[in-house]
Image (cartoon, rainbow, N blue to C red):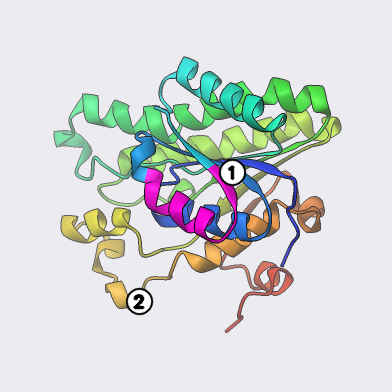
Amino acid sequence: MSNLSDQVILVTGASRGIGAAAAVELAKQGAKLCLSSRSAAACSDTLKIIKNAGGEAFAASCDMSDYRAVEKLISDTMERYGRMDVLINNAGIVDPIGPIATSEPKEWAKNSSVNMLGVYHGTRAVLPHFLDQKSGTIINISSGAAHGPMEGWSAYCSGKAAVYMLTRATALETESDGIRVFGFAPGVVDTEMQVAIRASGINPVSQIPRENLSSADEPAIAIAWLCSSAADDLAGQELTIRDEGLRKRIGLPVS
């Protein structure tokens, strides 16, 4: 287990799924946290778990598609804790699911505003602070959908592909400034997003039985590991939890 004492970490989409599990794991390892969601109240369960275990965290409402709101979120985090060390761009949606020919343009655009623009907003808002302090970590939650098209997921695949290139561009521009940038694909995890995917009945992912999905615990441990100096040599890369070499380094089971 890494020691993240004194690290200040902002997790977007922290109300459930991978974001919530990561927040709990990070707090367990000593980090101070800002839990962000469209509704701060939605993070109440995660916040309670952290505080009951003696961790330090607060919850904040933020629409990641609104740059000024994201700017304020980061400013509030830094005002509360005096600094910020890690941004985990986890907030994301899969809808709309369906054929491009019948897709609703407003819903397609909404997906892009969260999955791609939201990551840009977080990155843009935090980078000046990271550049000033000559340190910082950005972890962008990626997906296999960034690299392979899936029927019915045109918006989601396009957004994740854009985040992949944004990750690489950010790393290229900041690698000499003490800033680490990672893409991380957590695999097919048992989250509420998977409920919507199964209900759609579209593409092979929707056919995966729930009992065959991974829990959010392993991605949470991996994300915490990426926050530590143990991952320094991997900065700038997009990583996947399915990589056996990575799993061995983190200490996760290998089949």
Q: Which residue is at 22% across, 25% downward?
A: 105
Residue 194 located left or right of residue 183: left
Query: Residue 53, relative to residue 38: is it above or below?
Result: below
Q: Report the residue marked by disc 2.
A: 212
Q: Determine which of the numbered discs, if any, sits on residue 235 in the image.
A: none
Give me the C-alpha separation between circle 1 and circle 2: 31 Å
For mark 1, give the secondary structure: strand
Is the N terminus in the top left, top right, bottom left or bottom right quadrant? bottom right
Judged by its main secondary structure, the magenta piece is helix
Query: Residue 88, relative to residue 63: is it above or below?
Result: below
Which residue occupies the extreme top position in the image?
A: 68
What amino acid is at disc 2? Asn
In percent of width and height, residue 100 lies at 22, 37
Earlier in the chain: of badge 1 and badge 2, it is: 1
In magenta segment, residue 146: no
Q: Specify the segment rendered in magenta.
A: 43-57
Q: Are marks 1 and 2 in contact (CB under 8 Å)?
A: no
Question: Image quadrant of residue 174?
Answer: top right
Residue 108 located left or right of residue 71: left
Circle nearer the viewer, 1 or 2: 1
